[in-house]
Amino acid sequence: MSHFTNNKSEQVDKPNTDDAYTLGPLQAGPPCCDPEPLIRVDNLSLHYGEKPALEGVSLDIYKGCITALIGPSGCGKTSFLSVLNRLTDMIPGCRVSGNVHFDHRNLRHPALDVQRLRRDIGMIFQKPVPFPLSIRRNIELPLREHGMSKQAELNDVVQQVLQDVGLWDEVKDRLASSALALSGGQQQRLCIARALALQPKVLLMDEPCSALDPISSGVVEDLIQRLRGKYTVVIVTHNLAQARRIANYAGFFWIKDQRAGCLIEFGQCKQIFEAPAHELTAAYVNGSRG
Amino acid sequence: MFKNALTTLLIWLTAALVSGVFVWLLADIIIHGLPKLSWSFLVEAPENAGRSGGIGPIIVSTVLILGVAMVTATPLSLATAVLLSEFIRHDSVFGRLVRRSLDVLAGVPSIVFGLFGNAFFCIYLGLGFSILSGGLTLSCMVLPILIRTAEEGLQATPNDYRLSASALGMSRSATLVHLLLPAATPALVAGLMLGVGRAVAETAALIFTSGYVDRMPDSLFDSGRALSVHIYDLSMNVAGGDASAYSSALVLILLLLIINSIALSLAKQWLHRSVVTA
Ligand SMILES: Nc1ncnc2c1ncn2[C@@H]1O[C@H](COP(=O)(O)OP(=O)(O)O)[C@@H](O)[C@H]1O
Ligand SMILES: [Mg+2]
């Protein structure tokens, strides 16, 4: 009896969106059986002017897996993500050193086609940033910029990605109205759809749920789980329970000696949360520090 | 409690004073200007030094001068504002130099612009007293206002748009055209209106450059009298010209209102198009 009520209340909390998605079934969270690194970061350091923000970070991002980055504010998680899609290029005074390889190519090569790279490695920000355009134009604008111009093709992609994020049924009748009128959760899913439209290999997500209410946050979390396998996801989150639920791998960042952020520990999510090797990690995931 | 009431009273008094002055001014102009205002006044040429007749050629000259000024100043200022706000670091030496120069220019009295325009456009470039000289002089004069308002409008657009657009692999120019400029349009229009307002009210700079010939201009190279110059002349140099001066002032205000509403509706249409259509 109690089991039954439990089930029911869960269904009320999370709208049953199974039919709306085209990304496939929700996958639980087993670590990928044969992990293949897609991004390799080796001894990465980052300075803003003279101030160090990251020091000596080395880790591998595995293909098709969800990697969660956790740690207190200001320890350089956002900065780390910005290195991976070269958004650091846009920050004056930001210096990066170390090696980063994406798909066996040097990601930091000065002659790299950055626009192409950002197509391959999409990014979702903490605050949803829909452009002040119609819902349809939000998705079409970057596509057109990347050379897709046939309206029929564009329509197909718009429908496909909106279905992928479970937004199609909610907005199919008002594609021409402003995206700013959507709710926070819908806006964030639109931003994810916009990134998916470019067919990226990797999605970087910087606290994608922290500006959302719990229900929208749950919907977005479901969506992220569905991305597993098709996309490689790197997600920064302050919600440890969420990281534990969805991630295959986890990295713990900490500010060392009041100076620069560094990676304390990286490994399979289960291990980080259940058998952390470092005492700082243990203290942080148990909630006694951070 | 008493303090609060006093503050409220003061605020209301100030508001009443400001709007009172405006209403008084407007009422004065309407009361004195309306009787003479008629269709023939708008189209006929002035007679008897403007005491009678109309202001047809003067409206034409005014619109032409304004047109020259805005057509030259708008693209130039937009380009400069884009350069300053999007392509140059905010604290760079070049940027600071340009901004400082613009601030100084914005404070220069218009009579100085008039003398400069006379020396440069009329004499050095050989354009003589002409609508072109006047328009170009006004263009120089409104440039600082247009640039600074456009730049501020661009900088007020959320930086998130720039980051998100780059994260989607969009180029800077596409971001500018599709996102930043539409988002800054209200500010751009407001700046444009300020510029038009300043240009249309200008007298000193025009006396030395476009002159005060009140005939209908044949081309941009003809001298032409602007409305503000006409009003100045009627009220200062022509005994018995007050009635015409008031009517001309009324026309000037109406002209401003018309330009304002046209610009606003154009901007609205443009915004609407960039939001809704595919
Ligand atoms: N654009 C910037 N300019 C200067 N310092 C910055 C900038 N962005 C972040 N920082 C600094 O770098 C450190 C790491 O920031 P961030 O990467 O945002 O950390 P997190 O995302 O983990 O909270 C912080 O101390 C922050 O103040
Ligand atoms: Mg952050």
Image (cartoon, grey):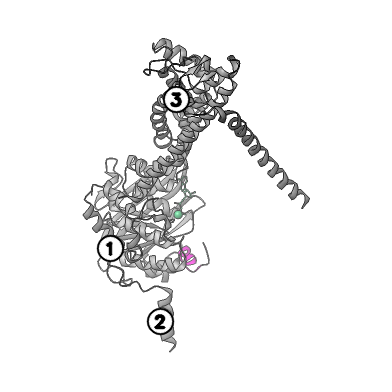
In the image: residue B240, left or right of residue B152: right
Which residue is found at the position 26% from the left and 47% from the top? Answer: A146
Pick whichever, A26 or A145, lies toward us.
A145
Q: Are marks 3 and 2 in contact (CB under 8 Å)?
A: no
Q: Nearer the viewer, mark 3 or mark 2?
A: 3
Q: Give the mark count.
A: 3
Report the mark closest to the observer, 1 or 2.
2
Q: Which residue is mark 1?
A: A64
| Mark 3 surroundings: few (<14), some (14-19) or many (≥20) residues within 10 A | some
Q: Disc 3 designates what residue?
A: B43
Image coordinates for residue B136, horizontal then vertical, percent: 42, 21
Residue drawn at (31%, 67%) of the image: A226
Residue located beneath label 2 in the image: A7
Q: Which residues fall within the magenta stretch?
A: A278-290
User: B115 and B262: which one is in front?
Assistant: B262
Relative to B277, residue B265 above or below: above
Percent of width and height locating residue A11: 40, 77
Seen in the picture, residue A59 relative to B221 is either above or below; the reply is below
Three-letter code for the amino acid on which mark 3 is drawn: Val
Q: CA distance from mark 3 to mark 2?
A: 82 Å
Q: Is residue A141 left or right of residue A255?
A: left
Between residue A290 and residue B131, name the one nearer to us. Answer: B131
